[in-house]
Amino acid sequence: MILIGDYIPGKSKVKLTIELQNILCNLEGPVLPRLNSFSIRPKAGPNLFSEVLPKSNNHFVFALANNHIMDYGHAGLIATQGTLNQNGYKYCGAGKDLTDARKPIIVEDSGVKIGIISCCEAQFGVANNSQPGVAEFGPWIYQTICNLCETVDTIIVTCHAAVEDSPWPSPYIRELYHSFIDAGATVVHGHHSHVPQGYEEYGDGLIFYGMGNFAIDPEKWCEYPNGMWSLAAEIDFSSKPLNWRLLTLEIRHIPGLETIMIEESTKEEEAIHKEYLNLCNIPLSSPKLFEALWHEVALRTYYHYGAEYMRFSDSQQVSRRAQARLGLSMFKRAILNSSKTSRLHSQNDFLLWYHMFACESHRQMLATALGVLAGEINDLRTEETRRLADEMMPWSLNEILK
C-alpha cells in the first residue's frame, strides 16, 4: 500500500505520471462538480472543495476525517460519498452520525487484511449522536483497534492533526501517535501540517507525522516551497518487520491549463528534500531539542496569527498569511464587524474562538505560548532552535515582530 498526503486541487485536474498501487489518501474537502448547487457552511477559515477525483486505474482509499470535508454541509458529504461509491473507492472517517463516522473499513492488499481508522482533531464538522460529520479522535480509537485486531492482519490509523506549516509535531500529537502503536496499530498516517514532517519507527510500528500536500492548487502554495512537494510511503504489510521505502513527490503546474501534474522528485530535488527531512527527524531522537523546538513553533504561531485571532494582540493589522487562514469572506465580515460596539461579539468571533479552543493543536499552541510568556513554563529556546526554526518554517520571528 502507498500512503500519501492531502488531496484538494480545487478546480484543477490532476495527472499522475507515476504508478502507485493501493493508495491511502486524505480527501481534504468534498468533491463537488456542480459547486453552485451547494451552500457554504459557516466556519473560520476557507471552504475547500475539488471538482474531480484523481483519474487512475489504481485503487484509492480515502480518509474523510478532516476539517474541510463538511465545508459544504451534509449535502456536500452525501454528494462526495455518492461520487466515491460510483468510482468504486472505499472511504471512512465521516458519516450521518457519530457511530457512522467512527466505522473503520477493511481492505486487502496482497492477501493481507488491513483495518483502517480515520480520525481528526476537533475543528469544524465534527459528528455527534444527532449530527453528521467527521470522527474526532478520542478514547474510542483504542477499543476500535482492539476490535480490529481480532479480524485483520494489520491496522492503520490515519489522523488529520498538526500545527499547520510546522515541520515538527507537537509533544501531545507525538505521544498520541505513540499510544496508537502501543494499542496495536501498525502504522500511523499523519496529515494536516501541509508541509512534510518527520517520521520514525516506534516499537513494532511506523509513524509518519505529516505527509504534506499531495495535490493542491499551486497558485495558493507556490510561495511556500515545502507546500509544493510531499511524501509517499510504500509499505509491504506482508513482511515482518515491515519492509518500506519513502518517495518524494512534486506538484507541477502546467501553465495555461487547469491541470497539475504529480511526479516523482528528480535526484536534485530528492537530495534537498532529504536534508529537510533530516532536520525534521533529528529532534525526534533528542527530547530536549524536540521540546525546545515546540516552544519555537508555539510562540511563532502565536505571534503570527494566534494572538490576533484571540484579540490578544494590540496590532490592528492582520498578516497576509493570517488573512489566508481566516478566509477572505470571513476576514471581510470581521472588518465590517469591527466598526460595531466592542461590547458585542459576532458569530464570526465565536466561530474563530471555537476554532482556536476546540482544535487540540491550536489549544496546545496557545497554552504553551502563554505559559512561556507568563513564566509558568521554562523557555527552552536557544540560538540553535532559532536557527532551525528560521530555516525550516515559512516565517521568522523577526519578520513577525516587525
Image (spheres, rainbow, N blue to C red):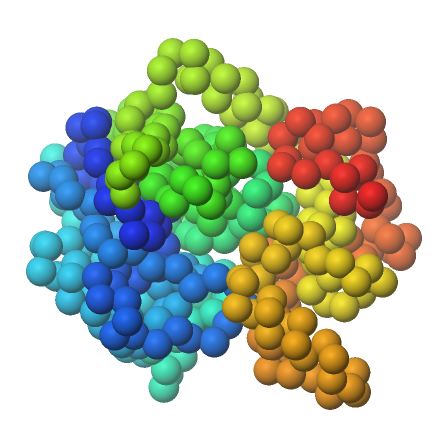
In the displayed structure image, the side of residue 274 where residue 373 appears, left or right: right
276 vs 329: above or below: above
Q: Position of residue 49 (x, y in %)?
A: 34, 59
112 or 24: which is nearer to us? 24
Image quadrant occupied by the N terminus: top left
Q: Position of residue 5 (x, y in %)?
A: 37, 42
231 vs 12: above or below: above
Q: Specify whether residue 276 is in view.
A: yes
Image quadrant occupied by the C terminus: top right
321 vs 240: above or below: below
201 vs 157: above or below: above
Q: Position of residue 233 (x, y in %)?
A: 33, 31
Q: In this view, which residue lies farthest toward the right?
A: 375
291 or 274: which is nearer to us? 274
Q: Specify whether residue 116 is in view.
A: no
Q: Position of residue 268 (x, y in %)?
A: 43, 12
What's the residue at 33%, 52% (across, down)?
Answer: 10
